[in-house]
Amino acid sequence: MRSGSNLEKVLAHGDFAVTGELGPPQSNDREVVVKKAKAYKGYVDAVNITDNQTAIVRMSSIAACAIAAGLGLDPVMQMTCRDRNRIAMQSDILGASALGIKNILCLTGDHQSFGNHPTSKNVYDIDSIQLIGMVKGMRDDKRFLNGEEMKSEPRMFIGAAANPFADPFEYRVVRLAKKVAAGADFIQTQAVFDVPRFRRWMEMVWDHGLHERVYILAGVIPVKSAGAMRYMKNDVPGMSVPDELVRRMEQASDPKEEGIRICVETILQLREIEGVSGIHLMPIMWESIAPVIVERAGLLPRPVYDQDDM
């Protein structure tokens, strides 16, 4: 085992994994994190804590991860390259490991011009692929990025993101291969609405044999309204949303219920695709719906392992 995290155990056992995404509050109110985390408990194998997502200031991912871990959840600390140089990143990785955090998702991060501090200075000292390699070097070689040896290594299960829908389409698998080569253990993808296009991406993944080297968790989003579905289709870069789904939401008498139904149908289709090891549920400030989706998708009960298992 590389980290001994619950997520790693689930995937290593061959179970279909479920992770959920939790956005910390724009405040120091820990009860917000507690409430969202409790909605996930027993329904996911690990919970991603975002790192100032959409470049908006929020409670730090490390702090929210520590709160979630204290509630018995297995946190995935998201870390972006936008806000820290390599010194701060390595420092935070050591600190997170000391707090018992065993999963990390390495991201580039949304550009600060999209957030609430658009004139702030970005960092991007290293990119997401270099970040993956840096964490792997710290874990497997017990060395900092400058080559110096450390006394004890952070045991991290290393994750990365992939977008099967951005253009140029063929390049997406090339970029995925670079992340796998850098040391990614698992991948979480952009939200899947267009299952046929995702399947074509997976066919390229098969051709490169990447599904045999890394665990792939497909992203899913439960959408609440037709307006939200249209926004996903028209205004979110790198997203593919079929017109059929927009029409279903527009014609639905209960759009929230229709959004749940679409999400569950998508999960059932994804489970049938070779090489998909799980799903990553991104409710976008609707964490309370996670139990409903996981139950309707037939993903309960979640597997439970002993502390010393594996």
Image: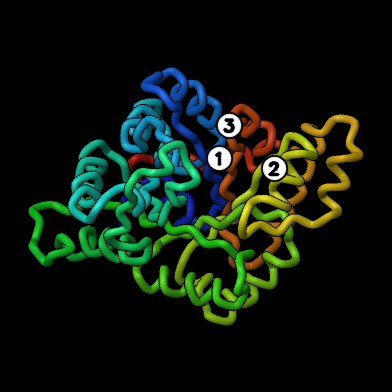
User: At x 34% / y 34%, what residue is drawn?
Assistant: 60
**Residue 267 in sight in this render:** no
Residue at left 31%, top 41%? 101
- Residue 265 is at least partly visible in this image: yes
CA distance for labels 2 and 3: 23 Å
Q: Nearer the viewer, residue 98 or 77?
A: 77
Q: Nearer the viewer, mark 1 or mark 3?
A: 3
Residue under the point 38% across and 55% down: 106
Relative depth, front residue between 284 and 261: 284
Dot 3 amino acid type: Met
What distance separates the C-alpha of mark 2 from that of mark 1? 10 Å
Q: Which residue is mark 2?
A: 298
Where does residue 136 sit, x and y in percent of width and height? 27, 62
Q: Which mark is residue 285?
A: 3
- Position of 48 compared to 147: left or right? right
**Neighbourhood count class around disc 2 (C-alpha, 10 Å): few under 14, some 14–19, many 20 upward:** few
Q: Is 128 above or below relative to 102?
A: below
Residue on which disc 1 sits = 302
Image marks 2 and 1: residues in contact by CB distance under 8 Å: no
